[in-house]
Image: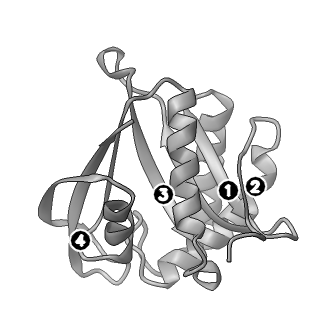
Amino acid sequence: MTEDVLVRRVGASEVAACVEPLADVLIDCVEGGASVGFMRPLPRERAVAFWRKVAEGVVRGERVLLVAEDGAGRILGTVQLILSMPDNQQHRGDIAKMLVHREARRRGVAQRLMAAIEDEARKEGRTVLVLDTVTGSSAERLYERAGWQRVGVVPKYALMPDGEFCATTFFFKHL
C-alpha cells in the first residue's frame, strides 16, 4: 500500500525546490475543506509565500520538514516539527501542517509521516510533542490510534475554509 511512498527529511540545500509542489498540496487540502490556517479560495501566491517562510525556517534550523513522495518523486504529503521554542521548552516540539493530497489519502501516508516526524523529534532531543486538529476529523482518529493523548477541546477555535466555525482538539505525546 505505501511501498511506493518514500518519507524523507528535506534538507536546507533542497528546500527551495519543494516550495511549488508543497503549495500544490496545501491548495488541494484547503480546496478539500481542511482547516489548516487558510480560507478558500487560497491564491497560489499566498500558498507559495507560506512555503517560502517555512523554507526559511528550515534553513535557519527552526523547523524540520518531511515530505512523502511517490515513486516518481511527486510530493504527496508533508508534516513539520517546529523546533524554535522558548529557553524553558527546549525539550518540546510542535507538530504542524500535516497535509496529504486528496489523491494520496487512505494509503497510509499520514501514518508514515507521523511515525517519521516522531523519529525526527527524538533525533532532535524532543521528548514532548503537541499538536491540534479539527475535532471529529479523520486526523483526530489518526492521532488517537498513534498513541497521542487528548488534552481537550476548544469550541469555535478556528474557521473551516468556507468560514464556518470548528472546534479544535489539542493532543500531546511523550516520546
Q: Which mark is residue 135?
A: 4
Residue type (three-letter) at the residue carrying disc 4: Thr
Relative to 167, is 150 above or below? above
The residue mark sitting in front, 2 or 1, is 1
Does dot 1 land on a helix, a strand or a loop?
Answer: strand
Q: Position of residue 134 (x, y in %)?
A: 29, 69
Label whose residue precedes the other's in the sequence (2 or 1): 2
Residue type (three-letter) at the residue carrying disc 1: Val
Q: Which mark is residue 18?
A: 2
Q: Position of residue 77 (x, y in %)?
A: 62, 65
Do callouts 2 and 1 mark residues in contact (Cβ within 8 Å)?
yes
Considering depth in this image, is 71 or 38 the residue closer to the camera? Answer: 71
Q: CA distance from mark 2 to mark 1?
A: 9 Å
Q: Position of residue 36 (x, y in %)?
A: 41, 65
Residue drawn at point x = 75 percent, y = 69 percent: 3
Q: Which mark is residue 141?
A: none
Relative to 171, is 163 above or below? below
